[in-house]
Image (cartoon, rainbow, N blue to C red):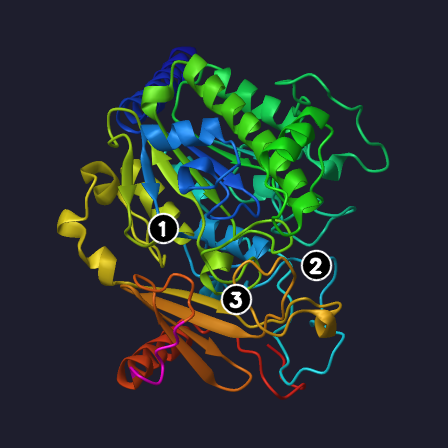
């Protein structure tokens, strides 16, 4: 009996060792064949905010360096013109319409209240990213990746404090093995105490969130990682304790630019963010994993209208004109993705899920995005010509701003440097053509972005047949996605 028991124990031990070796072998194979993935997500960074995207005075050498080493998209899009919705879409690979997550999270359930008479009733607020939605982190974890999240989540109802993580709907419940909630050096962390002034040139305030990312990147790992560095920069409040940066841009920015004081502060803010991105990139290089790591840099939506010059694009954060949704997007992988490539193929944040999973050796299902892997590795459209003709869809069935709506600008223009009225709207881009539909009056606008990136020449009347075709396609797409609509009846519960 003892011999039999020992035999069973030996068999179990052998099985355990074999299983452990098998798992280790899988991880080693995964490590050898699958790249690490580092996603750096900016907050409210405009398409035109970076030097590599042509800004005349913002100095962003670290992000510019990333662009020099990889592919820079000139038609990269956020999935939404607002934070939470965009982040939910990026993490799930689904449009905000399909997710029914189109606005920002709130601290309690309810409907939008606008301090002005408006004809439509937006949908109820979505407070949390549902746990049944599969995230990038969850699928990559299943493929043997170590997953880590740092910074801004904003995908659950505010818990205990503004932007506080929920113990039920936070990153660790959505597939992230490591999750660090930290404002870093962003003014959100200041509360009532402003840091001491920094007067020495090239000296910055230490950012604990960035330090956490760098520490993670420096640690030796036995499996590939997916790390998401989700920055609070350059979200308002826009202020910095680096007085030397303020002094620098006081000298560099022309005296006659509109909103000059705000733009001086914003320029210093953007350069501070670039410094922190540089620390992350340096840590990756020092770890020895740079050549094994795909780095993706992008923003969750367009720039704030009171600080960022979104021009030549029309609009800003909060609306579906180009300034609200077109964002920087840079992808780098030394030796795999050609360096210094500019790509004008339209891509969107919900493409990242299937792209990352494809690089990890699997296929994403039930997503709206497509894998950009063939495009990234080839450096040209080539056999992926269908990417140029596919349709991208946005849906924003809400009003903005909720307070002082009556005081906001009636017309959305180019570089208004003021908040304007955003009304329930949807948009579709196919090829170079983009159509916007405005729900209040069932009106459409049509633009050819290749000739008119500022969206100033409405073609909906002169090209009525094309406008109708795109309008029908947008309507059908939203119906297929079971999109929620802003409606006139206040009694509708959805």
Question: Percent from the top left, x then y, of residue 231?
Answer: 58, 37
Q: Earlier in the sequence, mark 1 or mark 2?
A: 2
Instruction: Tell me whether the residue at label 1 lies in contact with that at label 2, contact meaning CB atoms closer than 8 angstroms.
Output: no
| Residue 460 lies in the magenta stretch | yes
Question: Percent from the top left, x then y, of residue 404?
Answer: 75, 69
Q: Which mark is residue 100?
A: 3
Q: Earlier in the sequence, mark 3 or mark 2?
A: 3
Q: Circle 2 is placed at which residue position?
A: 106
Q: Residue drawn at (32%, 49%), measured in percent from left and top?
A: 364
Mark yes or no: residue 179 visible.
Answer: no
Instruction: Name above or below for residue 104 compared with residue 153.
Output: below
* The N terminus - image quarter: top left
Q: Residue drawn at (71%, 33%), measured in percent from left and top?
A: 240
Q: Main secondary structure of the magenta part?
A: loop
Q: Quadrant of residue 117?
A: bottom right
| Residue 258 lies in the magenta stretch | no
321 or 415: nearer the viewer: 415
Mark closer to the observer (1, 3): 1
Q: CA distance from mark 3 to mark 2?
A: 15 Å
CA neighbours of label 2 inside 10 A, class few (<14), some (14 to 19), many (20+): many
Mark yes or no: residue 372 visible.
Answer: yes
Circle 1 SS class: helix
Q: Residue drawn at (62%, 63%), measured in percent from left and top?
A: 126
Question: Percent from the top left, x then y, of residue 197?
Answer: 78, 24
Q: Circle 1 is placed at which residue position?
A: 351
Q: CA distance from mark 1 to mark 2?
A: 27 Å
Total count of labels:
3
468 relative position to 125: left or right: left
* The C terminus - image quarter: bottom right
Q: Quadrant of residue 435?
A: bottom left
**Segment colored magenta:** 457-463
CA neighbours of label 1 inside 10 A, class few (<14), some (14 to 19), many (20+): many
């Amino acid at each position: 009996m003892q011999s039999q028991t020992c035999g069973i124990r030996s068999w179990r031990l052998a099985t355990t060792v074999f299983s452990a070796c098998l798992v280790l072998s899988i991880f080693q194979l995964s490590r050898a064949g699958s790249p690490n993935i580092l996603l750096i997500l900016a907050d409210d960074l405009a398409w035109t905010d970076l030097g590599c995207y042509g800004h005349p005075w913002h100095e962003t050498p670290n992000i510019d360096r990333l662009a020099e080493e990889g592919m820079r998209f000139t038609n990269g899009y956020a999935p939404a013109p607002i934070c939470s919705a965009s982040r939910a879409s990026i993490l799930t690979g689904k449009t905000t319409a399909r997710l029914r997550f189109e606005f920002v999270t709130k601290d309690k359930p309810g409907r939008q209240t606008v301090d002005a008479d408006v004809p439509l009733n937006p949908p109820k607020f979505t407070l949390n990213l549902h746990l049944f939605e599969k995230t990038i982190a969850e699928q990559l974890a299943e493929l043997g990746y170590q997953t880590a999240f740092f910074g801004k989540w904003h995908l659950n109802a505010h818990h205990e404090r503004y932007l506080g993580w929920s113990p039920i709907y936070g990153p660790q419940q959505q597939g992230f093995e490591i999750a660090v909630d930290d404002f870093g050096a962003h003014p959100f962390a200041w509360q009532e105490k402003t840091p001491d002034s920094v007067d020495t040139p090239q000296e910055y305030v230490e950012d604990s969130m960035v330090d956490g990312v760098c520490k993670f990147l420096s640690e030796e790992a036995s499996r590939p990682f997916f790390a998401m560095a989700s920055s609070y920069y350059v979200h308002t409040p826009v202020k910095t304790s680096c007085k030397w940066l303020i002094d620098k841009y006081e000298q560099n920015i022309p005296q006659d630019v509109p909103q000059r004081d705000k733009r001086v502060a914003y320029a210093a803010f953007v350069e501070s963010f670039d410094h922190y991105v540089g620390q992350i990139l340096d840590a990756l290089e020092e770890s020895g994993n740079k050549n094994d790591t795909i780095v993706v840099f992008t923003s969750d939506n367009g720039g704030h209208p009171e600080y960022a010059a979104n021009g030549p694009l029309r609009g800003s954060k909060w609306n579906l004109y180009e300034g609200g949704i077109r964002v920087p997007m840079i992808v780098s992988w030394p030796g795999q993705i050609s360096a210094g490539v500019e790509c004008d193929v339209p891509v969107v944040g919900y493409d990242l899920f299937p792209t990352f999973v494809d690089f990890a050796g699997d296929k994403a299902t039930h997503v709206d995005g497509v894998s950009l892997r063939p495009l990234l590795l080839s450096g040209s459209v080539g056999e992926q010509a269908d990417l140029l003709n596919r349709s991208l869809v946005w849906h924003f069935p809400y009003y903005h701003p909720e307070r002082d709506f009556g005081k906001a600008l009636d017309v959305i223009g180019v570089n208004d440097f003021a908040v304007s009225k955003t009304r329930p709207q949807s948009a579709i881009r196919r090829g170079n053509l983009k159509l916007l539909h405005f729900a209040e009056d069932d009106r459409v606008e049509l633009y050819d972005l290749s000739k008119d990136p500022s969206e100033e020449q409405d073609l909906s009347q002169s090209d009525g047949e094309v406008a109708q075709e795109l309008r029908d396609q947008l309507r059908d797409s939203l119906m297929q996605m079971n999109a929620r609509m802003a409606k006139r009846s206040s009694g509708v519960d959805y």
